[in-house]
Amino acid sequence: MQLKTFGTVSAAILSVGAGALTQSPQYSFLALPVAIVAGIAWLIVLAVFLVRNRKHIRAWLKAMEPSHLLIVGLGGVIVFALVALVAAIWQMRRGDELQQQVASQQVEIKNLQDGLAKAFQSRAPTVPAPARAAAPIRYTAYEKEQRLRAVDEIYSVIATQLQPIYAEGNKLIDGIYRGSVPGDAEQRLTDYRNRVQAAFDNLNTLLKKYNYFPDIVQVTRKNTFNDTEATHEAGNLIGEIAALRQKAPNDMPWFLLRDTTMMGAREQLRHFEQYLSDTTKALQEKRTEIEKAEVYLGQ
C-alpha cells in the first residue's frame, strides 16, 4: 500500500467517524458506534500499511532526521486538535438537543397546568353576585292619580269597545264559515269593520293623550296587533261573499268552507283575541304596580 493510498483511506475513515459524531439529533444514537467502528477500521488500515511497507519504513527510519520527528509531532498535534474540535462540536450539538428537550418538557408541563386550572374553574361552583334591591317606585299623589286614570281610560276602551266588537265579529264570521250566510252578511261585515276601526281610533287617541306616560303606552304595544290587521281580512271577505253571490249563490257554504279569504279572516280573529288577552292582562298588572307605588311630597 502506497503512502498516498493510506492517506486517502485514512481521510475517508476519519470523515466517516467525524460525520457520525456530528450527525443530526434524530440519529445521534448511531454516532458513537459508527465512530468506534471507524477508529478500528483506521487501526486495521494502519497495521496493513505498516506490514506492507515495513522495508520502506526501516529504510526511512535509518534515514530519519530530527526534523522528521518534528513534522510527525506537528501532524499528531493537528490530528488530535481535529479530534478535539469534533468532540467539542458534538458536545455543543448534544447541549442544544438537551435544551430543546427541556424546553419541550417545560411547554408540556405548562399546558398541563393550564388544562388543570381550566378544568378546576369549570367545575368550581359559580357564586352569583348578590342582586341589588330594586329602588321602590314613588310618585307624587297627583302623578299617581293621573297614572291610574290613564290606565283606566285605556282599559275601558279595550274592555267596553274592542272586546264586545270582537265577540260579535267572531260570532258572525264563524257562522258564515259553518254555512250560515245571512242575506245581509256584507253589510254586517262592513259595520263590524267600521266599528273595529272606530274603537282602535279611540284607543290611539288616548295613547297620544297619555304619551307622557311611555311605560303605560308601551304595555299596550307589546302585542303588535293593530287596526290594519283587525280590518283587512274582514274587508276582503266582504268582496269574496259578494262575488260568490253572483257566481254560485247556491254553493256559497261549500266554497267558503275552502276559501283562503275566509281562512285569513278566521286567523285574524285568533290574533285579535290574543291581543285583547295580552293587553288587558298587561294593563291590570300596570295598575297593580301603580297602586303599590309609594307616595311622596314633591313639586
Image (tube, grey):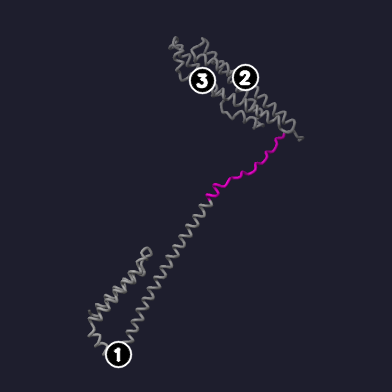
Closer to the chain start, of discs 1 and 3, is 1
Task: Tell me the number on the disc at residue 161.
Answer: 2
Q: Are marks 3 and 2 in contact (CB under 8 Å)?
A: no
Give me the residue at 69% from left, 29% from top.
147
In the rendering, at what x and y percent does residue 189 appear?
54, 15
Q: Amino acid at mark 1?
A: Glu
In the rendering, at what x and y percent does residue 283 appear?
64, 27
Which residue is more in the foreground, 255 or 84? 84
Kindly indicate the quadrant of the structure image that contains residue 191: top right
In the rendering, at what x and y percent does residue 8 appear?
26, 76
Give me the residue at 45% from left, 65% from top.
99
Q: Amino acid at mark 2?
A: Gln
Q: Secondary structure at mark 2?
A: helix
In the rendering, at what x and y percent does residue 19 appear?
33, 70
Q: Seen in the image, is 230 located left or right of residue 244?
A: right
Q: Amino acid at mark 3?
A: Arg
The 10 Å Cα crowd at callout 3, few under 14, some 14 to 19, many 20 or more, is some
Residue segment shown in magenta: 118-138
In the picture, the quarter occupied by the C terminus is: top right
Mark 1, residue position: 65
Mark 3, residue position: 266
